[in-house]
Structures are given as C-alpha cells and as structure tokens.
Image (cartoon, rainbow, N blue to C red):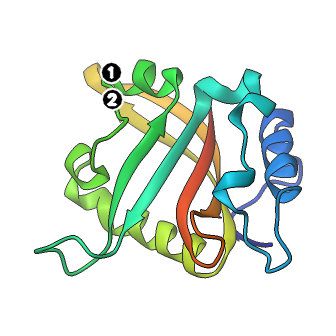
Amino acid sequence: MQRLGNWPQTLDGRLLAFVRYLLSLRAENGLIPREAFDPLELPALLPGLLIFERHSDVPDFARPRYRYRLAGTLHRKYHGVELTGRWFDEMHPVEMLEEFEQVFCDALDKNAMHYKKAQNTVEDNVHQVFERVLVPMSMDGQVNNLLIGYYIWR
C-alpha cells in the first residue's frame, strides 16, 4: 500500500501495530474490507481510534463530506466534545478543511496510508502534539469510503 505524508524512519510501536494489523486484512484487490476489521483485536488502541466516513452524494454539497463514524474516548478528551456522528466540516475551522479534505481524498482514491505529525492549538492557547496514521477501508470491498485512523498525543 502506498504511503503519503512525511513518514518517520521509525514509527511509534502503537502506530506500527495498528498499520500491521490493518495491512494483514487486505483482500486480493488490495482493499481492506470493513467487515474484516475487528476493533477488539486492538483493545489497547481503541481510545485513540477514529473512523471517518465519506459521503459523496450529500444534497447541496459539490464536494464529498466526511462524518465521524466513530471516535475513541481520547478524542473527546483532547477535543472537549464528542465527535461520533458529527460532520467534519462542522467541527473544524474553514481554513483547515481544504488541507484535510485533500488528504482524505488522496488516501481513499489512491488506496494509500497517510502519516502526519503536527501541533494543534486548543482552548487557552494550549498546544498539543499528535501523530496519526490514516488507512483507507471499504464498506463494500470495491471502493474505499472509510478512513480509519489511530492517534497518539504527546
């Protein structure tokens, strides 16, 4: 599977376990079917998991929208709000959307993993450093329409 982003020479062990598990689920066509993914296989990683769902046919939207299908408990802690079920574009500033949507589209359309290490500024100007890997998955086994990510905050 292709890699996008600036991958480090050495990946954190938790991110590596996440990637190895998901890659072990690939079907013959190279896609990872959602039905093959069992979150209970990675119990220690559950709090940092995040699943985005792409919706390409939302009325009144010219571009795809992304919904938080599942957000582990650490996401609520670091964002201060429950993300599960919410639309990505309603939760983040407009200036972030173009970059993130491009990453999401590239990962899904190119069947590629994406790595990022960055710093977020949240309430009271507190800075949080995170690392994450996004991996595409397919609901129907034919087209990628989910991104599953694992996040680590430092």
First in residue order: circle 1 vs circle 2: 1
> Residue type at mark 2?
Val
Question: Residue at image x 74%, y 23%?
Answer: 43
Circle number at residue 80: 1
Mark 1 touching mark 2, by CB under 8 A? yes
Count of numbered labels shown in the rendering: 2
> Residue type at mark 1?
Gly
Query: Disc 1 versus disc 2: distance between alpha carbons?
Result: 9 Å
Assign the N terminus to one quadrant of the image: bottom right
Q: Quick one: label 2, few (<14), some, or many (20+) residues within 10 Å? A: few
Question: Residue at image x 44%, y 73%?
Answer: 102
Which residue carries the number 2 mark? 122
Q: Is residue 36 left or right of residue 89?
A: right
Residue 146 visible within the image: yes
Indicate whether 124 appears above or below 50: above
Assign the C terminus to one quadrant of the image: top right
Callout 1 secondary element: loop
Q: Nearer the viewer, residue 140 or 101?
A: 140
Q: Quick one: label 1, few (<14), some, or many (20+) residues within 10 Å? A: few
Q: Quadrant of residue 81?
A: top left
